[in-house]
Every structure is written in C-alpha cells, then in structure tokens.
Amino acid sequence: MSEIEKERIKEKESVVVEGITLTGQWNRMFEQRVIWEYDPTNLDKVTSIAGAESLGWCYQCGKCTGVCPVDHVASYSPRKIFSKVRGGVDLFSDPDLWLCTTCGNCLRVCPKEVDMLKIMPAVREQVVAAGNAPPELQQAFENTFRYGNPLGEPPRKRADWAKDAGVTVPVMAQVKRPVDILFYVECYWSYHPRGKQAAQAMARTLNRLGLDFAILGAEEKCACDAQRAAGEKGLFELFTEQNIATLGKYEYATLMTPDPHAFNAFKNEYPKYGATLPVVHYTQLLAPLVEKLPFTRELKYKVTFHDPCYLGRQNGEYESPRHLLQAIPGLTFTEMLRCKANGYCCGGGGGGMWLGSFAASHEKERLSERRVKEAVETGADVLAVCCPFEVSLFEDAVKTTGNAGKLMVRDIVELLDEACTPAKEEGAIA
Amino acid sequence: MNLLVPLKLVPDLVEELTLNEAGTDLDRDALIYKLNEFDDQALEEALVLKETTGATVTAIALDAPEIDQVLFTALAKGADRAVKVTGDFEPGIDNHTAAQVLAGAVRGQQVDLVLCGVQAPDDLDGQLGVLLAGALGWPHVSVVSGIEPDSAAGVVRCHQEYAGGSMALLETELPAVLGVQAARQPPRYAAVSTIRKVMKEKQLEEVAATPGEVVASKLQVRRLFKPESRAHARMLEGDVTRQVEDLVAALNERGVLKVGV
C-alpha cells in the first residue's frame, strides 16, 4: 500500500457504481492481505530454515489436499499444515511433522511449488538434532549408524542371503577385476526374509541373462535416503562419504539397485557430494533384456502394479516396470485407478517405514491398507511391486484388511524368476 | 556439583560371539562394540541432573578402539567435558585394574559424585563401582535410581528398590560413588550431525594412567566355552500312579530324597 501515492487518490464518503452504493471507507479489499492478523512467529520459524521457505508461498488453493495420501487417512495435506502453522501451531512439536511420507504428489499439482520434499527434511533435521524425533525413528537412525542398516541386523551377515540363491553371487573384494554391473542390494533385500527372496530371484535372473555382476557384500551400507528425508542429514552425509569411498575402490560400468530410495540418492543427492554414479533401477536394467529371458511357463495371474514414489513421481520411471510385467507369458495386467504420476503412496517413504506405531496412532488407516484395498478392487490376484519397502508393508496390509488368500504381493523380479522356473510336474511331491 | 560418569564399551551381541583359538577369550578382533547400556543410563541421569541443578558432567573412559566416538557422543548429548585415560590397557581389562586406573584419574579431577552403570555384560556383579569407591575410600550405594544430590548439605539421596515392592530412600555423604540402575527417562538421542560437529569443534582431554596402576590381570581364564547341553528332560508317561512311582524312583536314584524308598 505504501507504493500508492495517496495524494492522487480522491477519497469520497460513498460512491454509487451501476446503481450500487459503495462505502468510501478503506477496507481490506483494497489493502494488502493482512496476514498480520495472525501471529507469524511459528510460520517464520519454519520459513526461516534453508529449504523450508516455500511453506510460506502457499495461497490455500487446496489442490494438494485432493492428492495427499495422508489426507485420506487423517486431516492432512500441505495446505492444512500451512493453515495450522499460520494459525499458531508449532510444527516442531506437532505430530504432523512426521506423517508426511515425502511422496511428492502435492508438489506435482502445486501452482506455487510448495515443496514438502524440502520442507519436511529441513524442519525434521532441527527436531532430530534437538533429540525430539519419535523414539522408534531414533532407533532406526541408531541402528543405521551402528550397523549400517536400519533393521539393526549384523553387518557381517549382509550378504548371507546369497548362500541360498542357488547361483554364485560374486563379491567385489574377491573378484578383483572390473565388472559390468555392481548390484547394490540395499538393506531390506539383504535382511528382510521376503526381501532376501527377491534378492535371490535377482541373482538368478542376472545369471540367466549371463550378466557379469558382483555385490559389495559386508562392505555395503545403507544409502540412507529415507533417513535423509526423515531428518537425519548428518547420518546421510556420513554414509554418503563412506559409500562414495567404497564405490570408488572398484570399477564397474553400471550401478544397479532395487531400491528406488537408494536410486534417488545415487542419482540426485550423491552428485552434490562429488560423485556422479552410473546408476539404474533394476527395472531399467532388465527392461531392454527381458525378451532374452528363458521363460519356461505361463503365469496366469491377473497383476496390478504399485508405482514406487521415488521411482515414478520423483524420477519419472513408469514404463520399465510395466514393460517387464507385460513380457511375462500368460500374465494379464491391469492398472489401479491411481497410478503412474498420481500413484498412491505405500507409507514407507520419508521415514514412514520406521514410524508404523506413531502413524497408526494419528491415522485412521495405514496407507498400505488403503492401497491394498485399491488393488483388490481391480480384481487382481497379484500386487506387483519394485521397492524393497513395499513387500512387507503390503503383505501386512493384506492380512490386516482381511484379504489374506485373495491377493499375493510379489516383487516384479520374483515374477520373472517364477516364470523362468520349470513348473513342478503334475502329481510330483511338493 | 561435579558429576563424573565412567563409560566403557562392551561386546555388541548383534554379531555372533566367537572364541579365540586358545579358547580362553572372545575373538576380540571379530567383535564390534557398543556402550554398556547401564553406563548410558548413568550418563542420562547425570545429564538430567545437569539440566535440573546446573551440575557439570564429565564423561571419562579408558582408552580403547572406538572409545573416541563414545566420548564425542557424550559431548554431543550435553556432557561438559570428556576425558580419555590413556595407557597400555589389555583388551577386556579386568575390573580391579580398571577401578585402580579410574581412581587415579578421579583423584586428579574435582569430583563430587561418580555415577557408574550398575553392571555390564562383562561385570554382572557390578564390581566396578564398588572397587572404585573402595580405592577412593568413598561411600558407595549400588542399584540406585532417582538420584538427588544436595550439595549445600554435602549429601546425596537416592532410591534403592527391594523385593516385594518396597523402596528405600538412602542418604550418603559426598563425595560418593553410585551404581545407577536406571535414569529417570530413556537415554537421549544424539543426532549424527551434532556428533560430527562436536568432533570438529571440541577435543577430548587426555590423561595418562599413573604408572604402576596398570598391572597384568591376576585373573587367568583357563577355558571359555559355549554352554553345553549335558542332559535332556525325560517325560514321565502312563497313569498318575505310574508317573508318581517313576518320579520317586528317579529322585531316589539321584540321591535327592533323604530317605530311600
């Protein structure tokens, strides 16, 4: 208002415009929006943090609310967070700080580019540093710091899954030569019982394609991308430095990982720390080669596919997973209503993987449960995934939503492996 | 009020324990270590006392691989000072030696109250605090919680829990050594960024162990081995009379009964 030269404005008590009497009194219509009606302290506290400035850009259009996965199970969304914080809520001590899974669907539709993928990690970083993160999340951080994986599993057993792969899984430190593919297994494929099965299926698939690959074995450590999004930037930076040093010891043409979060870290974050890595997600490696796989049987499954947020929306890869599924003989593919760029979130990103109890006490339903119901609605009997977080989350959700026996959860590589495994002969003893 | 918290690393059971070739110790090269959880409780109690009473907290540890990170973590959590006692310590140093060395270091510091972890996986009897108090000639109370120092009166009060739900409130003169069972709140989290910042900005104080205090252990381990299963349960079968007869016969056979049946 100060820019307007007041002397040029003629003030009248009232004026009649097209037969309607308008008061001449200055009112809010003509003045700058009065956000000083609110105490801006708590909003300033957020927007003064580097990376979190964009929360202040929200103009309350509400587009995010329609697509926010958390808003389906709680009163949430960036618009509501802005509104709460402007109204005086301290985000630093509010449970809302931990519910965002950094799925990024809000940013896709936001006209003002309010970026929760930057706001949430930045604010969380300060709360984590003050020691006020939810205890279950801190436990995952401590496990990662101490053992190199958030599950708290023994570092020396990181490659134990390979023993039951049925094929040789070479380890970089032992092969002592350059390899074509460095297979970065990541934590849930290394340790989770269902993840290990997928890792084994991957080793067999690489073997069937005659690809030259090796793993890091016990040298491998978590890429820490989800810990970064959950606010443990120091942990992320420490592990980034260590992982860059480890990767730098070896020669390989392609860095391949099954974990979209690790993929995101290697592709988008590690370059900030000086490492440009030739990284691909495993679906990208296999998609051009899938026709060469020696399929031995038809899989007569009706399959639907869940896009991982950090592969799809965050990194634009939607087609490779679908190409792999559609190459499997006998398989029928069907899409869920929310797919690709508008894909729903499994709830595991941004630290959600380690906030199960916390989220359960603030949400009326788990995101994974909501998603499993959508998968069941398509009539599919297999929910295909390609992120290591998802198998355990969705398998639990299948049980808790009463869909046990109706829907199987399979990693795409498990389906590829199954289609290449000779069917048991009729009448053979299982 | 100056609080001192001795910290030590113990084997982390996340990895399987393996024995050395001689079968007299753990294979210490294969071990990974972590802070003794009771020491973490003692540190937390000290940090709470710092916040409530303005006490100064010093963490102290005998030199060992990876001990620097433990001490820096203590600083990151809010300890005012971190002291590393240097010397030629054996891996798995025994409690008597550790207590002597710590006592020497404590004498060189202004200390009103030592808060030890009540026990450790390699010190299930909780000897360290007792031996340290003995070496210093200070009073000692073990298995305590709810610590309330009163520096004006020169005493510390603490709680000791007994069987059957009774609780004692004890008071002892300062300086003293306490064996802390549990802090009043769970140990706090130190963010990795804070630890890294502390590692850049702060230094550990180093104190050399007094020569003569570090002596070879008088304890000789002849054999360390995994528990061996030597017998199995036997299920008694048949009707009740038959089972009772078999039971009595079995007890009699083993000489458990006073009178032969």
Image: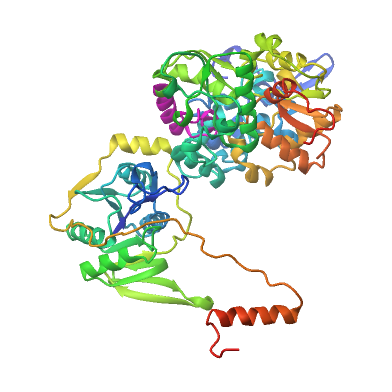
Q: Main secondary structure of the magenta part?
A: helix
- Left or right: where B201 falls relative to B14: left
The answer to if A78 sits in the magenta stretch is no
Residue A246 image position (x, y, % from top left): 41, 24
Does residue B129 show up?
yes
Residue A426 or residue A367, whichever sits in front: A426
Residue B59 image position (x, y, % from top left): 30, 52
The answer to if A234 sits in the magenta stretch is yes
Q: Seen from this angle, which residue lies furthest bottom?
A: B259
Identify the residue at horizontal 74%, vertical 82% (top origin). B241
Residue A258 image position (x, y, % from top left): 60, 23
Q: Is residue B127 above or below residue A187?
A: below
Q: Is residue A170 above or below residue A138?
A: above
Does residue A49 show up?
no
- Residue interval drawn in magenta: A220-245
Location of the C terminus of chain B by quadrant is: bottom right
- Left or right: where B91 falls relative to A56: left
- Left or right: where A334 falls relative to A314: right
